[in-house]
Amino acid sequence: MPGYTRSEAREWAREKLVGAVNCTIPSFTGDLRGINEKAIRHDVRLAQQHGFLGTLGVSEVNITMAEYLEFLRIIRDEAGDSFVVVHHGSWSNLEQNIEAVRGAEEAGADLVLLAYPPNFYPESEEEIYDYTRAVCDATNLAVILFPMFLWGFSPRIHSSDIPARLIRRLIDDCPNIAVIKAEGGFPSFQGAVECHRLFGSEVVISVPIEGDLIPLGQLMPIQLSATSDHEYYGPTIPRVMELLREEKYDDATEVFWRIHPARKAKGAMAAQLNGGAFINRQAWKFQGWLQGYNGGPLRQPTQRIHDAQMNALRKGLIDSELKPSMDPFREFFIGRNPV
């Protein structure tokens, strides 16, 4: 159960959610018949060592709901009470998402990242409102509202993915919406600016794209960067957020340019492999492996990653002086904690 009530969700978020939240992708046993507890615990410990305030337990892989909820329980048990566990509300339909969010609450999650199913095809703002309201009403957990191009709402509904007038209604009617993950209209950062201007005094505005976070953080206060594949940069993003909070903008700018080769490599990877408006979790898992996270096999169906992409991602980190693992690529497909 959360350590706050629904009416306290926004106050809790403002106080607690200061820093960066990475992503933990489930790890599996070598025969892919079960989840790998040892590997999951390894990834949680490393995220804490890297300075993340919490992690998203990714559900967009081939995993059963029972396995996923056990995955969240393992994260909660390993992390302790001070680490924020984020439930990934990304299941096949509204019924499953309500079942999952209730299970996540029992498993010890603190927060929900609300996604929309691939088969959800709203033709009006009201349909988005109804879906979002149903998920929010089903849980006592604080919710992250997520305007994003992946849902396919633009331009049919609005070019910003979820328009500000609809966000206004949802904030007014759902007291547990405590965060906006402001990626509306990506790759433009206008959505983040608009959300900060209109809603920043009421809810926490998260800027998850580090290429936007570092420059925007020098112009407006950003307390949270959640959730993203920040593990690719090791401990860099938690550290740069400290620099922004301390208004050490020259130092933050130096970090921005130093990691630019890695940023460009990751961006090129996304352009190549994120076809079908789907995030390549295999690539994200490899990015983490380069910084010491477990890696390891994923079940079919999963997207693939080949030598050219792996070499490019590693070279980006080398050029950014971020000291990636130089282990043979074959070790990624086994994982650092094989079971």
Image (spheres, rainbow, N blue to C red):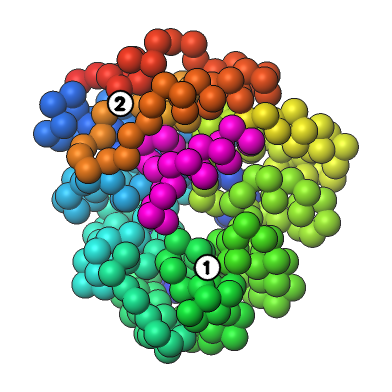
Q: Position of residue 314 (x, y in %)?
A: 54, 21
Question: Relative to 188, does residue 35 appear above or below in the rendering?
Answer: above
Say which residue label 1 marks.
Answer: 147
In three-dimensional space, the C-alpha distance between marks 2 and 1, rounded to whole angstroms, equals: 31 Å
Q: Residue at x 28, y 46 (%)?
A: 61
Task: From the viewer's side, name the closer residue of 262 and 144.
Answer: 262
| The C terminus: image quadrant | top left
Res. 281 in view: yes
**Looking at numbered disc 1 in the image, what kind of residue is underneath it?**
Pro
Above or below, 181 against 263 in this view is below
Query: In screen coordinates, is 167 left or right of 254?
Result: left
Name which of mark 2 and mark 1 comes first in the sequence. Answer: 1
Q: Position of residue 310 (x, y in %)?
A: 46, 24
Which quadrant of the figure has residue 90?
bottom left
Disc 2 crowd rating (10 Å Cα; few below 14, some 14-19, many 20+) is many
5 versus 188 height, above or below: below
Q: Nearer the viewer, residue 73 or 274?
A: 274
- Highlighted magenta segment, given as a residue range: 263-285
Query: Which residue is pictured at 26% across the width and 73% down the height?
Result: 94
Which residue is depicted at the point 49% across and 11% down? 326
Q: Magenta: predominant secondary structure element?
A: helix
Q: Which residue is mark 2?
A: 296
Question: Which structural element holds mark 2?
Answer: loop
How would you rate the neighbour count of disc 1 (Cα within 10 Å): few for under 14, some for 14-19, many for 20 or more?
many
Q: Amino acid at mark 2?
A: Gly
* Residue 276 on the magenta segment: yes
| Horizontal and vertical percent position of residue 277 | 42, 56
Callout 2–callout 1 Cβ contact below 8 Å = no
Check disc 1 and report its element: helix, strand or loop: loop
Image position, residue 257 (x, y; %): 77, 33
Q: Quadrant of the N terminus?
A: bottom left
